[in-house]
Image (spheres, rainbow, N blue to C red):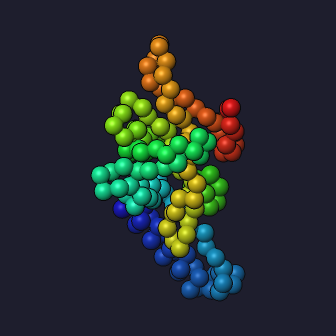
Amino acid sequence: MEGRRRRLLTVAMIWGLCACGHAETPDEVVEQLFYVEDIKAAMMAHIAANQSDDGVLRLVDDQTGESLALRFVKIHDPVRQIDGSTYFACTDFTLDGKPEKVYDLDFWMRPEEGELKIYDTKVHKEPRWSLIYGWYKYPRYTFMNDEVVYLY
């Protein structure tokens, strides 16, 4: 709620500037800012809209083509803004019926009609078994300057 209040204040201040004649042109576009609460709310709305009634999110693995039945666990902190209009969140999901197998999914979003909408989803880390560690999340890629760099 605090993020919405801040946004409304920002919009009110910008509206006040425009109304006082300080805007360059009447068609000047003001870039909307989204905050942590907004990013997390967009993620939760996306998950809720795309999961079945029993809480399962179906996703096709972008590398293997495998159909995954996943259950939401959490959104990682921090979520972030990558550039002026791209936002990012990393999440954990477990394989349905196998809570020890955890997938780390990354979501990219952009504003559409005043709301953040997911436009890309990738499996960042997949569950792998190790005799030493048991089940762990094995990374497929890393980030360099907010760009995805595949590891294999």
* Between 102 and 145, the one nearer to me in the picture: 102
For residue 47, say whether it is visible: yes
* Between 90 and 77, the one nearer to me in the picture: 90
Q: Residue at x 44, y 24 (%)?
A: 135
Q: Residue at x 56, y 39 (%)?
A: 124
Q: Position of residue 41 (x, y in %)?
A: 41, 58
Q: Position of residue 119 (x, y in %)?
A: 57, 59
Q: Residue at x 53, y 43 (%)?
A: 66
For the C terminus, the image quarter is top right
For residue 77, say whether it is visible: no
* Between 51 and 147, the one nearer to me in the picture: 51
Residue at the left extreme, as displayed? 54
Q: Is residue 44 placed above or below 20 in the rendered structure? A: above
Q: Is residue 107 placed above or below 151 in the rendered structure? A: below
Q: Position of residue 84 (x, y in %)?
A: 64, 60
In this rendering, the count of numbered labels is 0
Direction from residue 50 to residue 145 in the image, left or right: right
Q: Position of residue 140 (x, y in %)?
A: 61, 34
Residue at the top extreme, as displayed? 132
Q: Residue at x 46, y 17 (%)?
A: 133
For the N terminus, the image quarter is bottom left
Residue at the front extreme, as displayed? 66
